Amino acid sequence: MKISNTEYARRRRNLMAMMEANSIAIIPSAREVQRSRDTEYPFRQNSDFYYLSGFVEPDSVLVLVPGRVHGEFVMFCRERDPSTELWHGSRAGPDGACDQFGADDAFPIGDVDEILPGLIEGRERVYYSMGRSSRFDREIMEWVNTIRSKEATGAVPPGEFTDLDHMLHDLRLIKSAAEQKLMRRAGEITAGAHRHIMRSCEPGMYEYQLEGELHHQFVLGGARYPAYLSIVGSGRNACTLHYVENNARMRDGDLVLVDAGCEFEYYAADVTRTFPVNGRFNPEQRALYEVVLAAHEAAVEQVRAGNHWNQPHDASVRVITAGLLELGLLEGEVDELIETQAYRDFYMHRVGHWLGLDVHDVGDYRVGDEWRLLEAGMVMTIEPGIYVAPNNKSVARKWRGIGVRIEDDVLITRDGCDILTADAPRTVEEIEATMAA
């Protein structure tokens, strides 16, 4: 289950069709990052680079030159080196970049300073995402300065630099059938892991033990890594939105909020479930949970092609504000509380974000001054929440320290939407039944 070379080629053609005549696009790979004195973090390819090539090695540069006689797709990558490969694994090499990944031309990365200025020279426009890598920014400018130094002999430096992000990220925003299949599988693996930890959870366990169970399930499902640092926050820790210490002992009577998703073939899942450590919600926990669940359902109802990006959020805000008012955590009129954003003491984030190769995936949320319209093939999260800070003395003590979030991954379809992570128990009854089993 992978993206085909045919699809990668189509992505490159689509991008080049958006580029101006006589232009060039340059995309560097990710670099290996040192973790400690003699170890590196697991390498993860730059998502833009991967989207256009499927190539997963560091120290590479992808170049697109529309109309180039000798081939439009050029790669620079590491050479084959048997002695190095003995220790660190095989490399594709320039020949493999052509044979396995469809490059028209490929050269050793050591030759980039000699060859790439020649590809840039004479182009009217360079598409490049300046500011993402200061090191590569300097290399780009050195190549341009090399061309400028030869103007007296007829060399023509590029006339304009254009940020590549807008065009490329608009392409990434609409997921193909193959991408949707991968994201559906990521959602299935993640939902299964959340079901598993509900059955495994019991008072006295440490948060990191649930985290370990999650990651084990990811790997068993074929997903080597989590898509982001997993959040396992029990009790008052659930009120810290990006809590990742995961080192507290879980207590009888507390809720635990778990925000975790796997990465499957580079595509992310992002799921949050909140459940009682002992398997039973108490009345206050259940009351707040039901409000969040209603907000979740109201937001999903607004995930439709033709609706704008902010409609799901607006729906969640109205339900949460009304729920907090009914429970006595807010006072006043719903419309006024929404206008003054009084709900933000309890619900301080937006209802979701784009999802894809990145957890917070690329793509504009506004087009001009207007919210973007939703289209079939987009994938977003829906994740309303209520967090009652432990030190919030404006509410009764029984509510303090309760944090609830419910998050799913939602694919927009032609006739509605599809929750890719629906197999993770979501209602109170489903959660309690799963934990009892």
Image: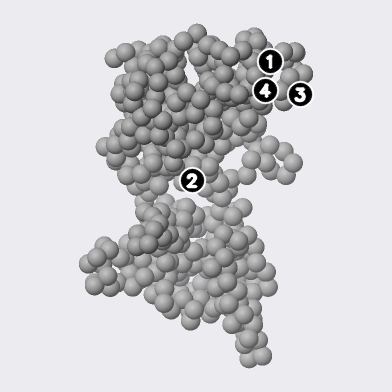
* Nearer the observer, 329 or 3: 329
Give the number of the mark in front: 1 or 2. 1
Q: Are marks 1 and 4 in contact (CB under 8 Å)?
A: yes
**What is the CA distance from the residue labelled 1 to the residue labelled 3?**
14 Å
**What is the CA distance from the residue labelled 2 to the residue labelled 3?**
33 Å
Q: Is residue 225 left or right of residue 287?
A: left
Please name the amino acid that badge 4 sits on: Tyr
Please name the amino acid that badge 2 sits on: Asp
Where residue 172 appears, as percent x and y from the top left, is: 52, 47
User: Which is nearer the N-term, disc 2 or disc 3?
Assistant: 3
Report which residue position mark 2 lands on. Answer: 358
Query: Compared with residue 305, is residue 264 higher up or lower down, i.e. above or below?
Result: below
Report which residue position mark 4 lands on. Answer: 343
User: Which is nearer the N-term, disc 1 or disc 4?
Assistant: 1
User: Which is nearer the N-term, disc 1 or disc 3?
Assistant: 1
Residue at image x 63%, y 30%? 348
Secondary element at tag 3 = helix
User: Which is nearer the N-term, disc 4 or disc 2?
Assistant: 4
**What is the CA distance from the residue labelled 3 to the residue labelled 4?**
10 Å
Q: Residue 100's image quarter?
A: bottom left
Secondary element at tag 4 = helix
Query: Compared with residue 170, is residue 350 higher up or lower down, i.e. above or below?
Result: above
Q: Is residue 205 left or right of residue 417?
A: left
Marking on residue 339: 3
Residue at image x 51%, y 25%? 236
Report which residue position mark 1 lands on. Answer: 330
Give the number of the mark in front: 4 or 2. 4
